[in-house]
């Protein structure tokens, strides 16, 4: 009995896999082109040249609606700290050192993993992998057009590179 059912089950699983394949679209889809501005800093223990001062970062946090800031440190390419919002709750956040944009730790991303990879590819990065969303920013490993391995932090709203570090 088992000898007769095994080939049938294998055949059904193969057919099921074949039927689950997506059929190619018959109509052509419209393509859209977007331009992204990249403000990059290189990860070091100090903010990069051309970066905003610590006071300017605090002002950017206040402009984003947060009152009290504590534990502000430059680490892994961006400023990290905690701030109290209008609801008097503390939130963890990161701030881009060059653009001053505030990224809240648990905020949702407007882009998904594939869109982030596509934005990085359009910006000239190759061999993009390990794309993950955590702490309010996308992180990815990639290779530059010159063949250098880099770690990237990516804006969750527009896919621009916020910071990069050579491996």
Image: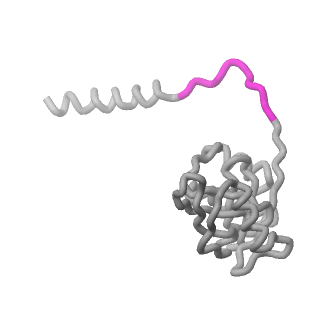
Quarter of the image with the N terminus in it: top left
Residue 6, compared with residue 162, is above or below; it is above
Inspect the magenta stretch and tell me whether residue 24 lies in it.
yes
Residue 17 seen in the figure: yes
The residue located at (60%, 72%) in the rendering is: 70
Q: Residue 75 at x, y = what percent? A: 65, 74
Residue 145, compared with residue 29, is above or below; it is below
Foreground: 19 or 54?
54
On the picture, is 105 further left or further right than 36? Answer: left
Foreground: 38 or 102?
102
Inspect the magenta stretch and tell me whether residue 83 lies in it.
no
Residue 114 seen in the figure: no
Foreground: 50 or 122?
50
On the picture, is 10 further left or further right than 105? Answer: left
Q: Residue 58 at x, y = what percent? A: 72, 67
Q: Residue 4 at x, y = what percent? A: 20, 28
On the picture, is 157 further left or further right than 109? Answer: right
Quarter of the image with the C terminus in it: bottom right
- Give the residues in magenta: 22-32
Quarter where residue 133 is shown: bottom right
Name of the residue lying farthest toward the left: 1
Name of the residue lying farthest toward the top: 26
The residue located at (65%, 44%) in the rendering is: 111
Q: Residue 117 at x, y = what percent? A: 67, 49
The residue located at (34%, 26%) in the rendering is: 12
How many numbered callouts? 0
């Amino acid at each position: 009995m088992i000898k007769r059912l095994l080939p049938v089950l294998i055949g059904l699983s193969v057919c099921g896999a074949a039927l689950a394949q997506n059929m190619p679209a018959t109509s052509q889809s419209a393509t859209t082109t977007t331009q992204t501005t990249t403000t990059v800093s290189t990860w070091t223990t100090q903010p990069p040249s051309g970066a905003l001062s610590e006071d300017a970062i605090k002002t950017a946090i206040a402009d984003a609606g947060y009152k009290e800031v504590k534990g502000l440190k430059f680490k892994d390419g961006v400023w990290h700290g905690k701030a109290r919002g209008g609801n008097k709750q503390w939130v963890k956040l990161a701030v881009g050192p060059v653009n001053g944009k505030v990224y809240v730790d648990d905020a949702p991303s407007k882009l998904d993993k594939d869109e982030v990879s596509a934005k990085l590819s359009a910006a000239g990065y190759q061999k993009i992998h390990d794309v993950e969303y955590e702490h309010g920013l996308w992180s990815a490993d990639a290779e530059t057009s010159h063949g250098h391995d880099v770690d990237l932090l990516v804006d969750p709203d527009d896919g621009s590179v916020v910071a990069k570090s050579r491996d």
